[in-house]
């Protein structure tokens, strides 16, 4: 049996993180507004559980980015394939990640990609050259480490 999964990342601003990573990876920010509007209309969720983001309703404490070619639920906007889900937590990041993403640009595009990601709000921590490979270690706008190879 094959199981589907998503990567869930704690965040202080899930919508900003979803927007950053969607732009970084060429993904789409999930649009959950049809489901949210329906649930609000039924009185099933309080309006306080939502916020307006880019002119549409979103969950206050959740934001996600999904691969544009993967399937998704039309009723909820939830991705069913490659997906990053950002959930709001009260505490800020304080230590090194135990898990990080590697973005594969290839040696011919690495520097160009790093520059593009810096323009989106990432910061370079260091460049690494080892016998096993070369990559650049960056942090996203909330300080989560990731590598560009």
Image (cartoon, rainbow, N blue to C red):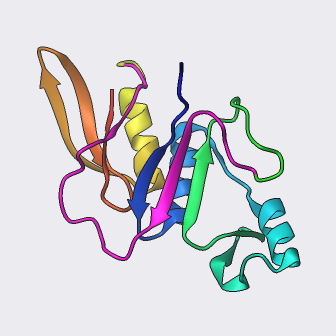
Nearest the eye: 1 or 146: 1
The residue located at (38%, 39%) in the rendering is: 114
Nearest the eye: 96 or 50: 50
The residue located at (11%, 14%) in the rendering is: 131
Name the side, left or right, on which 91 lies relative to 88: left
The residue located at (48%, 62%) in the rendering is: 87
Image x and y of residue 64, in percent? 58, 53
Is the N terminus in the top left, top right, bottom left or bottom right quadrant? top right
Q: Is residue 39 above or below residue 144?
A: below
Q: Is residue 28 above or below residue 133?
A: below
Q: In which quadrant of the rendered view does residue 100 lie?
A: top left
The magenta segment is: 77-106
Name the side, left or right, on which 83 lies relative to 122: right
Image x and y of residue 112, in percent? 42, 33
Nearest the eye: 9 or 54: 9
Residue lying farthest to the top in this orientation = 131
Predominant secondary structure, magenta span: loop
Name the side, left or right, on which 87 lies relative to 52: left
The residue located at (77%, 67%) in the rendering is: 36
Image x and y of residue 68, in percent? 69, 35
Nearest the eye: 146 or 123: 146
Q: Is residue 109 above or below residue 140?
A: above
Residue lying farthest to the front in this orientation = 1
Q: Indicate yes or no whether the magenta region holds residue 119.
A: no
Image x and y of residue 135, in percent? 26, 29
Name the side, left or right, on which 104 lies relative to 129: right
């Amino acid at each position: 049996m094959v199981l589907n999964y998503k990567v869930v990342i704690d965040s202080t601003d899930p919508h900003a993180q979803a927007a950053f990573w969607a732009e970084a990876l060429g993904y789409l920010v999930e649009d959950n507004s049809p489901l949210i509007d329906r649930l609000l209309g039924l009185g099933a969720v309080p309006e306080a559980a939502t916020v307006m983001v880019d002119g549409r309703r979103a969950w206050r404490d959740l934001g996600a980015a999904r691969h544009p070619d993967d399937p998704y639920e039309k009723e909820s906007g939830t991705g069913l394939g490659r997906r990053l889900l950002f959930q709001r937590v009260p505490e800020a990041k304080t230590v090194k990640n135990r898990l990080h993403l590697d973005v594969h640009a290839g040696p011919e595009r690495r520097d160009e990609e790093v520059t593009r990601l810096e323009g989106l709000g990432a910061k370079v921590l260091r460049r690494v050259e080892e016998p096993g490979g070369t990559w650049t270690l960056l942090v996203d706008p909330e300080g989560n480490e990731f590598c560009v190879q």
